[in-house]
Amino acid sequence: MKRVKLIPGWLLLAAAACALVRPSLCPELELAYIGPGAGFAFLGSFLALIWAFVLSVGTLLTWPARMLWRGRRRRKALRNACVKKVIFLGLDGFDPGIAERLMAEGKLPNLARLRQEGSYRRLRTTFPSLSPVAWSTFATGVSPARHNIFDFLNRNLKSYLPELSSSRVNKPRRVLQLGRYRIPLSRPTVDLRRKSLPFWKILAEHGVDCTILRVPITFPPEKFDGKLLSAMCTPDLRGTQGSFSFFSTRQEQVSYENGSRYPLHRNGRRITGQLEGPEHPLLEEAPPLAVPFALVPNGKPGEAILEIQGERYPLRLGKYTSWIPVAFRAGPGITAYGICRFLLTQLEPEVNLYVTPINIDPERPALPISHPAYYSAYLAKLLGSFATVGMAEDTWALNEGAIDEDAFLEQAWAIHEEREAMFFNSLAKMRHGVTACVFDASDRIQHMFYRYLENRASGKHARTIEAMYARMDELVGRTLRYVDRETALFVLSDHGFASFRRGVNLNTWLLDNGYLALRDGATTAGPYFKGVDWSRTRAYTLGLAGLYLNLRGRESGGIVAPGAEAEALKAELIARLSGLRDPDTGEVAIQQVYATNRLYRGPYLEEAPDLIVGYSNGYRTSWDAAQGKVTSKVFEDNPKAWSGDHSLDPVLVPGVLFSNLKLASDDPGIEDMAPTALALFGLPKPAHMEGQVIVETTKR
Amino acid sequence: MPLESVSLLLISAAAGVILLWVFRKTSDQAAIRRTKKRLQAHLLEIRLYADDPAIIWQAQKKLLAANARYFGLMLRPAAIVTVPMVLLLVALDGYYGKRPLEPGRAAIVTAQFEAAMNGGEVFRLEAPEGIAVETPGVRLLGAHQVSWRIRAAQPAAGELRLLAGPVTVTKSVVAGNERRFVSTRRVGLHPSLLLYPGEPPLPASGVKWIEVDYPAARVQMFGFEAHWLVWFLIISMASAFLLKGKFRVTV
C-alpha cells in the first residue's frame, strides 16, 4: 500500500534525488521537491559537507607528510626555541609619559602588573617618528635607509609631485583602445616599496606559523607561508587613502581636503543621491561609477529608511549603520565591491548624511589585501565585515566638521572591536608561532582629542584619552589570558605623543631666507609646489618631517651640486633651523635638525630626505607645508581637531615596550623587535639587521 | 522540441521564479546570509589551518552546527511553499508523469475497500468500449483490495464501473497514444483528495479508492529523456539560480 508523506526540507529533496535516479522506484516521492530554495539549501549544504569532508580527509591524510616536511624546516627553529608563542600587541602612539602617569594613579592595572612581573622600558623610535617608518623598522629590524620608508609621502623626482611612499598601484600595462573604451589586456599590479625582509618571512621559512594583522606598510601583502592582513596605506575603493562622502540637501559650496560633498535632492518624500565610487575602468573621460540611493523618512522622529541596490536599511539620527555592501558595476562581469557605513547627522530641516570612505570589501577584494588572498574573506565571513582602508578611522571627517566627536569615537571603537575580534581569533587558534596585531585607535584618538588633555578644549571629552588608555589596558588584560610560561608577550608602541598647537611652514621660511624661489614675483605657491621656480630653488619640504635639497642629477630641476656644495648647504640649514624660535610665542619651534646621512646607512639612503626636522613639543610641520604649499606666514595656529601629533623630534616621543620577559637592554629600540623575535625561535640575527636581541634567550 | 517539453520548460522556469520570490518574502534573509558565511568561513578555516588537526576537528563540528542552523532556517519557507508546491506537482504529475494506456497495453485496476471482505461478495468491473477486462477480480483479503487486469484495444476514454453488490462506483480511464491528463486514482472525501484532484470524490460506498496503474511517462528535452520531475527540478533551480542575484535572494 502506498502512502504519501509530505515532509518539508532536505528529506524531500533526497526523495527527489531518488526519483531522479529511478523515478519508478518512488513514484509518489516526486511530491518531495518543494522548490529551488530548499533545493539550493540541500545542494549547498551537501556540497559544503562533501567539500569539508574531502578537505579534512585530504588534510589529515597528507598531514604526516606535511608535518615531516615542516618538521625538517622547523627543526632548527623549534630545537633552539625559547618559547612556543610570541605575541606582539601593537598600540600605535601609546605614549610612555601618559602611561606612566596613569599606572602611577592605578588606572592601568594590567600594564602595571606586566611591568612588575616582567619588564617595561621606553622604546626608541625611528627618525622620523612616523608610523609607516617605525612599523617598517619593527618588521624588518633595519633603519629607514634599508627599508626605504621615510614618510607617508615621497616626492616624484621628475615632477616633484607627492607619491605614496609605501606602495604603487600600476594600471594595466597593455590596454586595447576601442574608441572611448579601454579594454585592459593585462592586470593592474601593485608594488610594495618597502624593502628588506620582515621577520615573519624569515620565521615562516623555518616553519614557524605567523599571523600578522594590520601591521602598517603591509600593502600589498607579501607572499609567505603564513597569514597576513594588510594595513596602513591600503587604499579605499576610489584609490585614495580614505575619502569620505558628505551628502546634504543644503545647497552650498563647501570643499573638503579629504572628502567630497554631494547634493541630496528632494523628490516628494524621497530624498535621493548618488554614491560615487571608483573611476570607470573601461570608459575614458567617463564620470566615476556611482550607485544611486534614496532616503525615505519612516514617519518616526529622527528615523529614515535607506534604499540602496534593492536593499532597505534603517537609519537613525546619530547612529551608524553596519557595513553596507555596495557593488559598482562597470559592465558585464566587471564589478568593484565595496563596503561603507552611513550616518544620518541631520534630518530636519535639512538632511545631512555622512558616508565613510568606501572600503574594499574584504569578502570580494578588488585589490589584494591579505595573504592568502582568501584570508580577508575568511575573517569577514567568520567575524563580520571590517574596515580595510589603511587609515580606517576617519580623522578628516572630524577635522572638517562632517561628523562630530561622538561619531568619530563611535567609529574608532567599532573598528577597534573588529580588530580585537581578529586578534583574539588568531590567539585562540595559535598553538605555536607568532601573532602580531597593531591597534590604531590609540593613535587616532590622541590625534583628535589631545587638545582636551592639555586643557585647550573643555567638555565631556576631557577624559577621552584617559579612557582610551584604560581600554587598551583591558585589551592587554584579556591578552594575558593567552600568555603562559612558554609565551613571550610584547606590548609596544611605535612612538609617543605630543601637542600640535602651532604649524611651521618651512617652505615659507625657505622662501623668506632665499633657499626657495617663486615664479613671476609671486609671494605664495599652491599645493604641490605650483608656482615654484625650481631653477632658483635649493631646498624644499614635503610631507611631515623631511627637508630636501634640490640636488642636481637627482631631482629633475636640481641645481645644488652633490658633494661639497650639498654638504655645505645642509650644514647651513641645520645651523639656521636648529633652535628656530616662534616669534609669536617666543618658544623654540625646532629643537634639532638631523642630516640623514649621519643617522643611518643603507642602500636606499639616496631616497631619504636630506634633513629630518626635529620639532619641539607643540610644533609640527604645517598642514600647508606638508602639501608643498608656500604661504604668507611661517608660523600659524593649528585650528583643527587634529591637535596631537608625533612628527616632532623623535627623541621627544619614544614609544613603550612592556613584556612578560625580563629585558636585557636598558635602551631598546623598535629595530630590536625583529631580531628578538628570531632569537626567541632560536634563529640567528641576519647580517643585514641592525637591531639587537633584547631578551635573554634560554632554550626551553 | 515537443510541445509538452516546451510547456514543461516554461512552467518549471516560471515556478522557479515565483518560488524564489516567495522564498525571499518568507525567509530570514539576514540570518541565512550570516549562516552561509559561517559555513564558508569554516570551510576556509580547514584550508587555512591545514597543519592543525585540532582546529580542523573544531571547524568540522562548527560546520555541522552551521549546516543544521541553515536547514533550520529553510524550514519556515519550505513549510509555506509545501502546500502550493504539492498541488502544482500533483497537477503536473497527472499530465507529465503518466500516459494513457496505449492500444495493446495492459494495466492493473485496484479497488481498496474500507472494511474486511468475507470472500463471498461479488465484485464486477465493466470497461468502456475499446478497453477489455481480462481477468476476474483477484482478492487480497488482508489488504481489503481487489484487482483486475484491463487491456486497451483502441483509443478510448470513458469510465470503469465497479459493481460491488448494490453499490456501483466509477473511475475514469483513458487509452490512446496522445499525451493528456490522466487521473490515476479516484478517492473518497479524504485529505488525500488534495493529491488526487482529477476526479470528484467517491460517494460513501465502502470503496476507499480505485486506481488505474497507468504506465509512467518520460519527457524529452535537449536530446535527453528523463522523468518530468528531473526536468522540473533542473529548470526551476536553474532559473532561480540565474535570477537570484536580480531578486537579491540568498538561498
Image: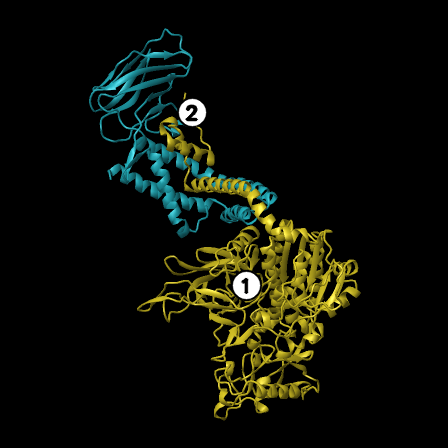
**Chain B is shown in which shade?**
cyan
How crowded pointer 2 is (Cα within 10 Å; few <14, some 14-19, many 20+) is rated as: few
Q: Residue at x 30, y 25 (%)?
A: B215
Q: Nearer the viewer, residue A165 or A532?
A: A165
Q: Amino acid at mark 2?
A: Arg
Q: Nearer the viewer, residue A594 or A111?
A: A594
Q: Residue A542: image x %, image y %?
A: 56, 79
Q: Which mark is residue A253?
A: none
Secondary structure type for disc 1: strand
**Chain A is shown in which shade?**
yellow
Q: Which mark is residue A3?
A: 2
Whole-angstrom CA distance, mark 2 to mark 1, is 58 Å
Q: Residue B24: image x %, image y %?
A: 45, 47
Chain ID of residue with mark 1:
A
Image quadrant containing the N terminus of chain A: top left
Is residue B67 placed above or below A441 in the rendered structure?
above
